[in-house]
Amino acid sequence: MAVRDIVIYPAEVLKKPTRNVEDINDEILQIIGDMWDTMYEKEGVGLACNQIGIDYSIVIVDTTVKEGVQPVRLTLINPQIIASEGKQTYKEACLSVPGISAEVERAYWVKVKALTPKGQEEIFEFEGFPAVVLQHEIDHLSGKVFLERLKGLKKRLALDKYKKILRQLERAKRENS
């Protein structure tokens, strides 16, 4: 297994829908292992496959690091939200959108259909924080980042701040090369 680089928004791979996994083979299992190594190295609680530059419909989630929430540690392949209820607002951040966090409204409870790494189709239910993480990661598979869930002034301010951060990252990259 290996730690991969995180793709930074607005990279093209983050703006396009991912493709379903047709066959869970050694390559897919290697990618999943790399995703786990990468997420833990970067101290995330969720990661979508396109965040490491590979356009497969795979997400991983580990909420066990956060106290007082439903402990979830899962790999989901081709996940689909098939039902949702309620509303909650949570301050979200993203490894692919460094330096930005914002309050995002999402469903409180979600039911997700997905394949496990063993190829079994299962139905999962999540509420609270794990539901937020799952919705955030599944958005990535649709080619969306959490900034796109913001509205009005909140969105404009977040995008302006992010543009400044991107310029700083570019400047730092040039200075280090």
Image (spheres, grey):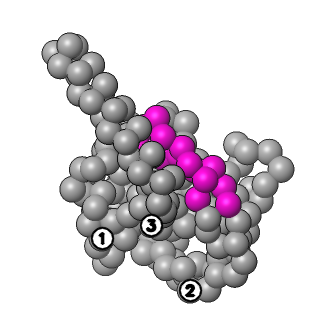
Which element carries disc 3, helix, strand or loop? helix
Question: Which quadrant holds residue 122?
Answer: bottom right
Task: Give the residue displayed 61% in from the left and 68% down from the top.
Answer: 106
Q: Given the image, on which type of amino acid does mark 2 rest?
A: Ile
Number of other residues with Cα within 10 Å of mark 2, as a class: few under 14, some 14 to 19, many 20 or more: few
Q: Is residue 40 magenta?
A: no
Could you tell me if residue 159 is visible in this image?
yes
Residue 154 at x, y = what percent? 51, 52
Q: Which of 159 and 142 is in front in this view?
A: 159
Judge depth for marks 2 and 3 and give the one in front.
3
Disc 2: which residue? 82
Label 3, label 1: how far apart the Cα atoms are:
9 Å
Q: Given the image, on which type of amino acid does mark 3 rest?
A: Asp
Task: Give the residue displayed 71% in from the left and 48% down from the top.
Answer: 64
Mark 2 or 1, nearer chain start: 1
Residue 98 at x, y = what percent? 43, 37
Residue 153 at x, y = what percent? 48, 54
Q: Given the image, on which type of amino acid does mark 1 rest?
A: Pro
Question: Which quadrant holds residue 105?
Answer: bottom right
Task: Give the residue displayed 36% in from the left and 51% down from the top.
Answer: 51
What kind of secondary structure does the magenta stretch mostly adopt? strand
Q: In this view, does 134 lie above or below 103?
A: below
The quadrant of the rendering that contains the N terminus is: top left
Mark 2 or 3, nearer chain start: 2
Residue 130 at x, y = what percent? 67, 61
Disc 1: which residue? 17
Marker count (numbered): 3
- The segment highlighted magenta reads 89-104
Disc 3: which residue? 139
Task: Give the residue displayed 69% in from the left and 81% down from the top.
Answer: 85
Q: Is there CB contact under 8 Å for labels 2 and 1?
A: no
